[in-house]
């Protein structure tokens, strides 16, 4: 859906993006992750032709973006800017209607879609006549998201869409968004510097530093098969938590030895899709670390039992063999 080939962009002597290539498949959630100034926004702006690359090519659906008229390109790509970009003199309804109006939708269709989207993003209907300065940061961000997806663009570019929010609101909007049909189906290129966020939403992550790609891969590939010291160090602080949230009982189960039940009388059942994080949480919060976990795998009627310690041993083996 998106193919970026050898893209570079310099501002004077400063090389903001340095020979970046990646491909994003249809329906994929691809996340550009990197620290401040690493070139993430610059990369997005080139895809949308807000700025032009110094060298390299970008294809959208097999067409060079330079050959697509800008208006058409902007309709095919929904863009959520890093900073709140609502028009201050337009109401919420008018802000959301910008692209539909360009597409000559009739009034009724615009109204229906807008109301449906507000409902999805849990904004009260009264907000339709509010102006951006009357919205909280979280509300404005929701309107931004609604505006970007109303015309059902094939591709969504999102630049730190949850960045300006407090951690609690951030997690709840992120969760709402990730549960939307649109999110699940669309091709999304999202920028963030929040590692947790990247791991929660990404099919694949592209970690960049100083305009260069350090590694492209699934969250687990970055964790368990880091391409270089930079990647390793980038996740050092959060490595354990990220690893156990992205690893499921299913993954490690073949490394667990089938056990006879021990004499503990507490037994917990977990579905195979349960994350290791969840299992640890339940077992440790209840101080039941000698409790056996009982899991029945779907395609396998082997019912194994394991204690937390045995699970962690299996996890280490899984990680080492990844
Ligand atoms: N229009 C511009 N003119 C000159 N330099 C620019 C311009 N836009 C970006 N830069 C420089 O390019 C580099 C990358 O900037 P960019 O905005 O892409 O970073 P970023 O990864 O999005 O950072 P952040 O996480 O802080 O948003 C920075 O050094 C920045 O100063
Ligand atoms: Mg940026």
Image (spheres, rainbow, N blue to C red):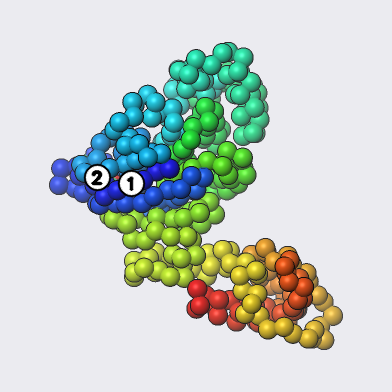
Asked if 4 appears above or below 264 in the picture, the reply is: above
176 left or right of 17 in image: right
Q: Residue at x 15, y 47 (%)?
A: 13
The quadrant holding residue 305 is bottom right
Q: Mark 1 points at which residue?
A: 4
Q: Earlier in the sequence, mark 1 or mark 2?
A: 1
**Percent position (x, y) of residue 128?**
59, 21
186 left or right of 225 in image: right
Q: Taking the image as four quarters, which one is ligand 1 found in?
A: top left
Q: Is mark 2 on a helix, strand or loop?
A: strand
In space, the residues marked 1 and 2 are separated at their CA atoms by 8 Å
Q: Residue at x 43, y 43 (%)?
A: 1
**Percent position (x, y) of residue 22?**
36, 51
The quadrant holding residue 205 is bottom left
Q: Which residue is drawn at 50% across and 73% down?
A: 322
Confirm or reject: label 2 Cβ below 8 Å from ligand 1.
no
Q: Name the residue under label 2.
A: 56
**Percent position (x, y) of residue 132?**
50, 25
């Amino acid at each position: 859906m998106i193919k970026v080939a050898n893209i570079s962009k310099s501002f004077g002597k400063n090389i903001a993006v340095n020979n970046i290539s990646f491909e994003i498949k249809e329906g994929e959630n691809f996340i550009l992750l990197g620290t401040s100034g690493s070139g993430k926004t610059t990369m997005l702006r080139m895809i949308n032709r807000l700025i032009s690359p110094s060298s390299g090519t970008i294809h959208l659906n097999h067409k060079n973006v330079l050959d697509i008229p800008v208006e058409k390109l902007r309709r095919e790509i929904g863009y959520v800017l890093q900073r709140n970009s609502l028009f201050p003199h337009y109401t919420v309804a008018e802000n959301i209607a910008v692209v539909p109006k360009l597409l000559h939708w009739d009034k009724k269709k615009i109204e229906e879609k807008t109301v449906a989207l507000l409902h999805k993003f849990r904004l009260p209907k009264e907000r339709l006549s509010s102006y951006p300065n009357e919205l909280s940061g979280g509300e404005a961000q929701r309107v931004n998201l609604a505006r970007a997806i109303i015309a059902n663009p094939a591709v969504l570019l999102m630049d730190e869409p949850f960045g300006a929010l407090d951690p609690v609101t951030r997690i709840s909007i992120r969760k709402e968004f990730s549960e939307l049909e649109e999110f699940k189906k669309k091709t999304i290129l999202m920028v963030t510097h929040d590692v947790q966020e990247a791991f929660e939403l990404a099919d694949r992550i592209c970690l960049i530093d100083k305009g260069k790609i350090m590694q492209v891969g699934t969250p687990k590939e970055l964790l368990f098969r880091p391409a270089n010291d930079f990647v390793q160090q980038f996740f050092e602080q959060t490595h354990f938590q990220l690893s156990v949230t992205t690893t499921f009982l299913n993954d490690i189960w073949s490394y667990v030895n089938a056990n006879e039940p021990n004499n503990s009388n507490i037994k917990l059942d977990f579905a195979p899709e349960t994350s290791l994080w969840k299992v640890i949480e339940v077992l440790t919060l209840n101080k039941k670390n000698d409790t056996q976990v009982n899991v029945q795998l779907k395609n396998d009627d082997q019912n194994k039992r394991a204690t937390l310690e045995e699970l962690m041993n299996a996890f280490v083996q899984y990680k080492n063999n990844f």
